[in-house]
Image (tube, coloured by chain):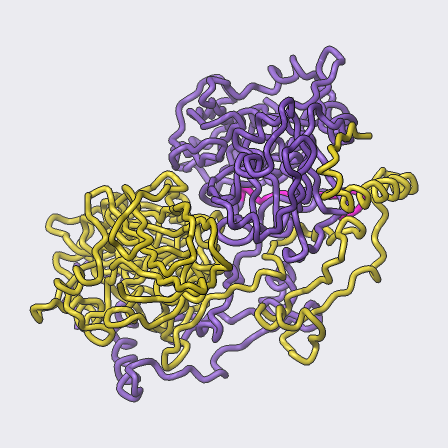
Chain colours: A yellow, B purple
């Protein structure tokens, strides 16, 4: 069947695979002859053992128990055959189905230990992720009153206040408008809040995991503004969510008209419940809290509404004792995700240092990497073409000599802004965290590698 | 708390929402005073009714039964409260969890009715999707021996044949190499195979759903080639999968060195089982069958291997009776996904016509739309910046006058190639489908809209 060419060296290494394959092709072809449509006969059900984990730990046994405990109730586990070519695999679902990740992939977000789990947050495992996008199932969460269950058929958006004609839009109404699709990160303004005074959380999931990137689809606010008409003098918009916290934020109308989106799509399907299903306000580059989830109301006004989130929360205490308000734009930032805290490098040699860089002000221009704690910097490679207000995966080839090292990355955005050191940031903002000025920590992150290859979060 | 401004018109429309909010803020603040950490008290469990669907239809009741039947066993359903601001929502999972889509989203792929479900395929519901990427759970599938269950700790890739040093790489080994991240579509060369002679499948899921787009992350083959060293005269590479079909294809080495990727990441996490977990060969722009899943072996040679997939399958019978072989590059194509087959427009008025365009030869240059069956064409708007070998979401504003119409889209790629009409394609290829020349149908798709607004698949 095949014109197979081996050299002697290959044969030695590949011999067991090739021999197994040859036997198997013969077996398969024999099977095919018994089968009317030239397809493989069905594997007897007994060949494969199923474990249904229905939430009861007692029903789990054997090596899959540990996996099953990390997964949602009802997940199905399969034994992995020693040679997968010798058994038919799983069938295509009769109804086509909706796929899920491999049973061997068990990363989860990590919940921050707040007093209760209704006003809480969870972190994206940046250390376990690859590429530039965040898997929808691992997008970070921050809720103030839990995740509401909303039937989109019963949800609507009211747009009123200083408008020509107040209107109420169903989700179906909104989907009839022209839509746009854009990739943007969302970062919680509290990302890194534990790290002001001393290195506190051990992994990059803890220090930087309130950051996620998705492809978002929705209607521009500008389109809706044309539909309702804005009155002269309108300058702020109140956005309100339909969750138990009735989250509210005031947004300058310039921002709303520039690039605000009312999004119903995330990574090709409906926006996830934790991200605001069925409708979220997306404000590219603004702090996450302003991207109101479960959006139900937009009120146009001529002044900000001074909600709790704008007075007691989400302000920045400065070194001079005054507080910055409405500091909503997330500044340029970056972090090395490999290697990062709690990892261990197996030994000296080549490592592909990799991380993410982003800016709320536009495109990432460049990323530099230091392996000596900031004494010298060299340019990293950007693995994707930078898009506006979107993370950029970067990488840097590094030959580790086995000596202690401190790894850092530094982002420069298209405005020329350079990510500051923690010292530079504290000179302006003071060192008030974690209970004073906890927000908007965008300082350079340092990972120390000791001679055993162990990686730790440090201030350097 | 808020400086609220209403005009009279707004008040009439928004009155019930605003009043409810005012009462509720008062209630919430009262609750907060009872709570030590300023957080909301926990909602009693009795407020929310859970339905655990454990695969037994008998355990389902009420309005959620229909939803539950479409979802995987073990999915959890919640009652949607009439006003979600009056109840605490779901809590953040204790372990942070791995999120899933809303219970109100029930789109699935659709399995093509092959003789058995181990050699079968399933279609992406393009009519239900938004944006440019495909949700990982809805990526189309095509398997020849089912979906193998592979433990990545036991999987490896052997690279041998005409190389300096044959080598075996574990998945961990491959992850240590520099990686790249790129968004590409994959299209099955059989996409549309039912549509050669007469319009057959009714929806765009059936006619075009063997097309999906993801962000892929992995190692360039060129990197691995440097690692093993290619011998002079090497010109083809055999790629082999570890599934029960032991799928094999021969790929020109120029293609392998130009842009072939060994991918382990999809949309930010590990590649999904149906897409080749833990390793897939990605060949940007080549027919889907060549993107060998569950990749375990690459053999370098000086000639193609003439596997079954290259002789009896995946060739194109031409009008002159000869067959095209190794016609692996997918040509420029596009399709309108809204409106599309089996939809009904509610009445005359504005519609945002939307669809996808793509080319295996590079970037989409432009898309034209016709509403009169190809008599006249006007440019569509591209909703995203075209990337090489990636779908582009396009849109076209259309005011439907209520009369019968035929909608078409036409893609031009960066090489200047223009998507052909079916007549133009058949003039070259003949009309041999569905049992002759079934592959590589990239003709313009026509959707007829009648005066009732009903949309149907037609040849026009």
Q: Is residue B101 above or below residue A198?
A: above
Numbered-mark total: 0
Examine the rendered structure and indicate whether residue B415 appears above or below residue B93: above
The structure residue drawn at horizontal position 85% and vertical position 38%, both measured from the top left corner, is: A37
Q: Residue at 66% across / 73% down in the picture?
A: A65
- Range of the magenta residues? B113-127
Q: Is residue B19 above or below residue A96?
A: below
Q: Is residue A259 magenta?
A: no
Q: In the depicted view, which residue is nearer to us: A388 or A265? A: A388
Residue drawn at 63 percent across, 61 percent down: A103
Quarter-wise, where is residue A453 in the image?
A: bottom left
Q: State left or right for residue A430 relative to residue B61.
A: left
Q: Is A51 in front, or is A376? A: A376
Is residue A50 visible from the viewing direction of this image? yes
Main secondary structure type of the part rendered in magenta: loop
Res. A205 in view: no
Q: Is residue A25 above or below residue B192?
A: below
Identify which residue, B271 or B319, lies in the foreground.
B271
| Residue A357 falls left or right of residue B4 | right
Q: Position of residue B270 (x, y in %)?
A: 55, 53
Q: Residue at x 91, y 41 (%)?
A: A30
């Amino acid at each position: 069947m095949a014109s197979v060419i081996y050299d002697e060296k290959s044969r030695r290494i590949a011999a067991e695979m090739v021999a197994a394959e040859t036997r198997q092709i013969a077996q398969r072809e024999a099977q095919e002859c018994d089968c009317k449509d030239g397809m493989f006969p069905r594997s007897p059900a007994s060949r494969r053992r199923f474990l249904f984990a229905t939430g009861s730990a007692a029903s789990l046994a054997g090596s899959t128990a540990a996996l099953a405990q990390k997964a949602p109730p009802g997940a199905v586990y399969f034994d992995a055959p020693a040679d997968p070519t010798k058994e038919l695999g799983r069938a295509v679902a009769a109804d086509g189905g909706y796929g899920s990740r491999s049973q061997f992939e068990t990363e989860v977000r990590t919940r921050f230990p707040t007093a209760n789990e209704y006003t809480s947050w969870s972190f994206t495992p940046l250390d376990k992720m690859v590429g530039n996008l965040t898997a929808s199932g691992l997008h970070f969460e921050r809720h103030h009153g839990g995740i509401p269950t909303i039937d989109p058929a019963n949800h609507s958006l009211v747009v009123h206040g200083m408008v020509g004609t107040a209107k109420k839009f169903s989700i179906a109404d909104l989907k009839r408008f022209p839509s746009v699709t854009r990739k943007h990160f969302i970062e919680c303004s509290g990302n890194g809040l534990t790290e002001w005074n001393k290195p506190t959380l051990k992994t990059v999931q803890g220090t930087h995991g309130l950051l996620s990137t998705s492809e978002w689809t929705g209607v521009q606010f500008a389109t809706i503004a044309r539909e309702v008409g804005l009155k002269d003098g309108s300058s702020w918009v109140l956005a309100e969510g339909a969750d138990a916290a009735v989250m509210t934020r005031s947004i300058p109308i310039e921002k709303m008209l520039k690039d605000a989106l009312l999004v119903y799509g995330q990574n090709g399907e409906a926006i996830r419940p934790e991200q605001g299903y069925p409708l979220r306000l997306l404000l590219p580059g603004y702090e996450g809290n302003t991207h109101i989830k479960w959006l139900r109301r937009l009120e146009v006004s001529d002044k900000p509404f001074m909600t709790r989130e704008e007075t007691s929360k989400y302000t920045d205490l400065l070194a001079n004792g005054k507080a910055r308000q409405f500091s909503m734009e997330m500044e340029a930032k970056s972090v090395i995700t490999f290697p990062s805290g709690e990892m261990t490098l197996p030994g000296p040699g080549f490592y592909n240092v990799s991380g993410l860089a982003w800016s709320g002000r536009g495109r990432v221009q460049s990323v530099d990497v230091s392996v000596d704690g900031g004494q010298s910097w060299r340019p990293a490679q950007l693995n994707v073409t930078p898009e506006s207000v979107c993370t950029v995966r970067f990488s840097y080839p590094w030959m580790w000599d086995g000596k202690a090292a401190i790894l850092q990355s530094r982002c420069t955005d298209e405005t020329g802004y350079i990510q500051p050191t923690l010292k530079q940031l504290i000179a302006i903002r003071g060192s008030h965290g974690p209970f004073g000025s906890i927000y908007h920590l965008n300082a350079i992150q340092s990972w120390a590698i000791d001679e055993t290859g162990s990686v730790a979060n440090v201030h350097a």
